[in-house]
Image (spheres, rainbow, N blue to C red):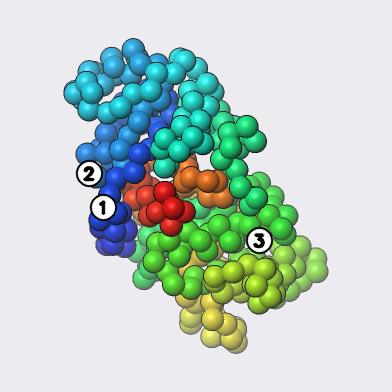
Amino acid sequence: MAFDRLFEPLRVAALAAGRLRTAVAYPLCPVSLRAAAQAGAAGYIEPVLVGPAGRLAALMEQEGLRAGSMEVVDAPDDELLAARAAAALARDGAVSMLMKGSLHTDHFMSAVVTRESGLRTGRRISHAFVMAVAAYPKLLILTDAAVNIAPSLQEKADIAQNAIDLARALGVERPKVAVLCATESVNPAMPATLDAAALSKMADRQQIRGGDIDGPLAFDNAISREAADQKGIVSRVAGDADILLVPDIEAGNMLYKELTWLAGAGAAGLVLGTRVPVLLTSRSDSMDARVNSCAVAALYARALGG
């Protein structure tokens, strides 16, 4: 499948870089525990399971995992407290990455984003999906479809910078960011187009660094050179985007699910703008998606100095 081919160089690079200690918060369902074990056995991470030791030991035995095969940090049998314990390991430098286990996303993220966690930076926290779509010749980064609901212009600038930094960590020398809207024309009645134009100029003035940004761009002329040519768009980005920056979470979530369920796209996802990469996996994620997320996060952690 397309995502196997496109993700393979990242997997190879992550394996070559070596395993990174990763705190897995509250992995108390078979899927999340097996994902941590498989990513560890494959050489992408060194899992550190954070949760009630007794329950974790019982689940490991149930799943046929050898006792002692993964480090366990005993934490209260409480989702939020376990998430805070995992975040503290990252804050103190004991691990280089965080991974969500079987707990609710709200509990996990609240432990990450609180000021007391010590994981925040001066930049807005955002989420990125790295996607492999059969009809596109390279990986696409879609942001933000999971964290920021209706980002402001400055928040979009941070989201763009986070995604550019991720793309560079994955080997894209100068990422191309398409700021998506319903049209490629600036229209004062459509605020997203004004933000897109401002982001393009901010990149020109080096307020956003390391990539080329153009917008507003409609989806077709962001990913198709033919569509861009038909509209007469002259752009370094149009038709060759590495990053799709959406106007809000609704557009991003729908686009992600359309690409996944209709186009059969493969995806890896992680939270950016924190001091360490945060893997925000879902219980519905395939094992391939979880392992790909580990590989992407490991490369990003190396770029951050992990």
- Which mark sits nearer the N-terminus, 1 or 3? 1
User: Element type at marker 1?
Assistant: helix
Kind of residue sitting beneath label 1: Leu
10 Å crowding of disc 2: few (<14), some (14-19), many (20+): some
Q: Nearer the viewer, mark 2 or mark 1?
A: 1
Res 182 → quadrant: bottom right
Residues tagged 2 and 1 counted as in contact (Cβ below 8 A): yes
Horizontal placement of 250 versus 172: left or right? right
Kind of residue sitting beneath label 3: Ala
Kind of residue sitting beneath label 2: Ala
Q: Nearer the viewer, mark 1 or mark 3?
A: 1
Residue 42 has which mark?
2
The residue most toward the right is: 188
- Which mark sits nearer the N-terminus, 2 or 1? 1
Q: Indicate whether 181 appears above or below 300.
A: below
User: Element type at marker 3?
Assistant: helix
Q: CA distance from mark 2 to mark 1?
A: 8 Å
10 Å crowding of disc 1: few (<14), some (14-19), many (20+): some
- Circle 1 is placed at which residue position? 15
Whether residue 258 is visible to the viewer of this picture, yes or no, is no
Residue 218 image position (x, y, % from top left): 60, 70
User: Element type at marker 2?
Assistant: helix
Residue 266 image position (x, y, % from top left): 36, 53
